[in-house]
Amino acid sequence: MAQKPSIPKGTRDFSAAEMAKRNYIFDTIRSVYALYGFRQIETPAMENLSTLMGKYGEEGDKLLFKILNSGDFLAGTMPNELHEMGAARAAAKVCEKGLRYDLTVPFARYVVQHREELQMPFKRYQIQPVWRADRPQKGRYREFYQCDADVVGSDSLLNEVELMQIVDEVFTRFGIRVCIKINNRKILAGIAETIGAPDRIVDITVAIDKLDKIGLEKVNEELLAVGLTPESVEKLQPILALTGTNEEKLDQIAATLSESETGLKGVEEVRFVLETLKASALRQTIELDLTLARGLNYYTGCIFEVKALDVQIGSITGGGRYDNLTGIFGMPGLSGVGISFGADRIYDVLNQLDLYPAEATTSTTLLFINFGTAEAAACLQMAQVARRSGISTEVYPDAVKMKKQMSYANAQGVPFVALVGETELAAGKLMLKNMLTGEQQLLTIEEAVALIAG
């Protein structure tokens, strides 16, 4: 017996109904990006490992899917050599390419490679899948889509402001209540200085970024395990526990970081973004969260994360400023800032809250019932009239029992069914049935189109 086929863990098939929902997500995000002047690009699914490695921190490097070299990639390798090398060195020997981990690093590579063609500032958006060799669990997949928008070639904090406006607009259109969390890596660097551990900024940010997932006690244990002194960990506690309004927290952290020039710079950047956004009358909540760290090493300024308020799930959008990223590829001094919508998590949230509009999940609006050869020929002509008027239309292909055809219409959620039998054929008309109300009307195809388009 043939083995039943399956797909890799952490990946999913999507049905036609599910794809209709996903396209609603992509189209909504795409339309908002376009409103703000962003232009679409695409990059390859695989990149050279030299492009990807070392850009996401040690933990991120472990999650890269590596691709074996084509051809006889073991040529010249002794039987025990790979085993003796260990996994990391062996992978480096037989793999030169990997699946992209996110869209930001490939974008930085794109900017450097095509810099002579680009007009700065360059505003791009990108909607493509990414891959991470993570442990699959609820809300976490190995293959998932990101919907990124980035601005490079501008240091202005107005870019951060506009990106937060985009986040606000997208989730308002979806009908999802969210909290936009903001922090600044300069503030985190200032905290590291203040607690006497300026050289441990990466360890500190990686640990406190897990606060929501593992709790304060485990975070403290992790900080001690990576070498922070008990005194430094103790000094960190009141900072992580700060409460109040955004303004009050900014004032408190500014006082705490009064001896850190870098930290105060971060405070002023966040203050500018929050003050400027007040005039925008955001419909979603925005909150300064000093425990937000965004573990990726390339962030250098404001950082963002978005949490759904009515569903228990991880962050559904994130991003920040990454002044030094293109410098890794030989183009120093080019500032960038971006956000990424997690389409798969947004999909799960919309499903749980049942927030999809009816038109987003209905593919066919009008179905013609097939009563036979002559009737089907007339239906095909009428269907073309409906389609040219922008109405998605099907003609049932087989002249089977009407019950089966109506069951198909119900299963597909088709709102209107057209019946063209002998009587209607002779009159050059159709009987239009509203599947929701059950009402039937004898109409010309033009009248039916007008009623459906209504």
Image: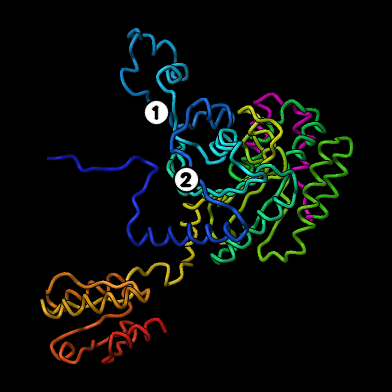
In the image, taking residue 158 as reference, residue 342 lies left or right, namely left
| Horizontal and vertical percent position of residue 357 | 46, 70
| Horizontal and vertical percent position of residue 212 | 62, 46
In the image, taking residue 381 as reference, residue 320 lies left or right, namely right
User: Which residue is the site of mark 2?
Assistant: 140
The C terminus, quarter of image? bottom left
Above or below residue 195? Residue 281 is: below
User: Which residue is the site of mark 1?
Assistant: 67
Q: Amino acid at mark 1?
A: Ile
Is residue 240 inside the magenta stretch?
yes
Secondary structure mostly seen in the magenta stretch: helix
User: Where is residue 70, by image quadrant?
Assistant: top left
Q: Nearer the viewer, mark 1 or mark 2?
A: 1
In the image, taking residue 223 as reference, residue 265 lies left or right, namely right
Q: Which residues are magenta?
A: 217-246
| Horizontal and vertical percent position of residue 126 | 52, 48
Q: Residue at x 82, y 55 (%)?
A: 247
For this rendering, which residue is in front, 63 or 325?
Answer: 325
SS class, disc 2: loop
Q: Amino acid at mark 2?
A: Arg
Point out the tag, 1 or 2, that comes first from the N-terminus.
1
